[in-house]
Amino acid sequence: MNSIDIFEAARPRLLGLAYRILGSRADAEDAVQDTFVKWQEADHEAIETPAAWLTTACTRRCLDLLKAAHRKRVDYVGAWLPEPIHTASDDNAEEKLALTSSLTTAFLLMLERLTPKERAAYLLHEIFGQPYDEVAETLHMQEAAARKLVSRAKTNIGIEKNRHQTPRERQDELLSAIHGGNIAGLSSLLSADVRLTADGGGKVATVLGVLSGKETVMAFIADRLTEYWAHYVWDVAEINGGRGIVLRGESENDIAASVSFGYDGDGNVNDIFIVRNPDKLTHLGDAAVH
């Protein structure tokens, strides 16, 4: 394989890593492209393991971009949500399902609790299977320090309760209740402490705060969202590892919003995520992230 082929073989993995670190496909694409430029300038003969080299270079670039992203979020209008992405479904591969569970919006928001290095260390070791010595080298630290970062991250994000798999049938039942206007059916699928979060980025009108509690969320859906949703074409899609909705205007590229969901261990909806910020919908139709 030549240098271009080596990089292209690694690209899907690099994009998946970068997206999980940054929460933005646009920024992830930038990080991968910057890694490609650095790869082109490298002495390939001196690189023993190209995959590890590329992962390290991409991770370090993501950490630089993450600092800038955090500064921008200080002035963000309303609630911030990760950029929604299309994900591939593979019901027959347990390993791929486990990987997909780390793409859910709820899980990505959990990662926001971590420091940049905690996030990178956790993802590299727990999600992408990188050994601790390589994680330590990537992050310029001792192996013992890398182990502590991963341990602290696992404690902070409560990993086991945020990466379970909700049966596809249960997810489809929810979508049918929403699309069919079955208010009673929808209410039965929501947890008592369900939250609704909408991200308009100050560019379109939306709820600025997080709505909490079944009564409050159901009232908002019945009084506001039911009429709003009726004006758009509904497309069921795989969004961030689960069944979601893309609301479109008259054309394929006219995306008005994405709607995705988080579930508790009993299969009840405990989060509804609505992204309306047009800047975050630009890449929703691009190739799936893994």
Image (cartoon, rainbow, N blue to C red):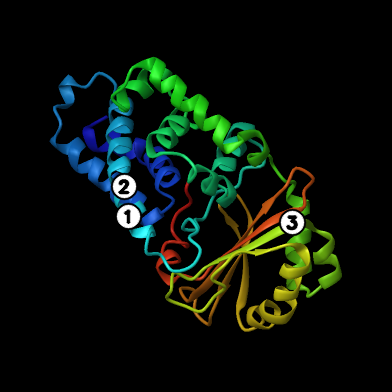
- Which sits earlier in the primary sequence, circle 1 or circle 3? 1
The residue drawn where x is 67% and y is 38% is: 161
Badge 2 amino acid: Lys
Between 277 and 71, which is closer to the camera in this rendering? 71
Do the numbered discs 1 and 2 sit on residues whose CB atoms are within 8 Å? yes
Badge 3 amino acid: Asp
* Left or right position of 206 against 243: left
The residue indicated by pointer 2 is: 67
The dot on residue 71 is 1
The residue drawn where x is 65% and y is 34% is: 160
The residue drawn where x is 32% and y is 41% is: 63
Question: Residue 189: x percent and y percent?
Answer: 80, 58
Q: Characterize the local packing of mark 3: few (<14), some (14-19) or many (20 or more) Cα atoms within 10 angstroms.
A: some
Let me know if residue 223 appears in the view: yes
The dot on residue 225 is none
The quadrant in which residue 210 appears is: bottom right
- Which sits earlier in the primary sequence, circle 2 or circle 3? 2
Question: Residue 240: x percent and y percent?
Answer: 56, 52
Secondary structure of the residue carrying tag 3 is: strand
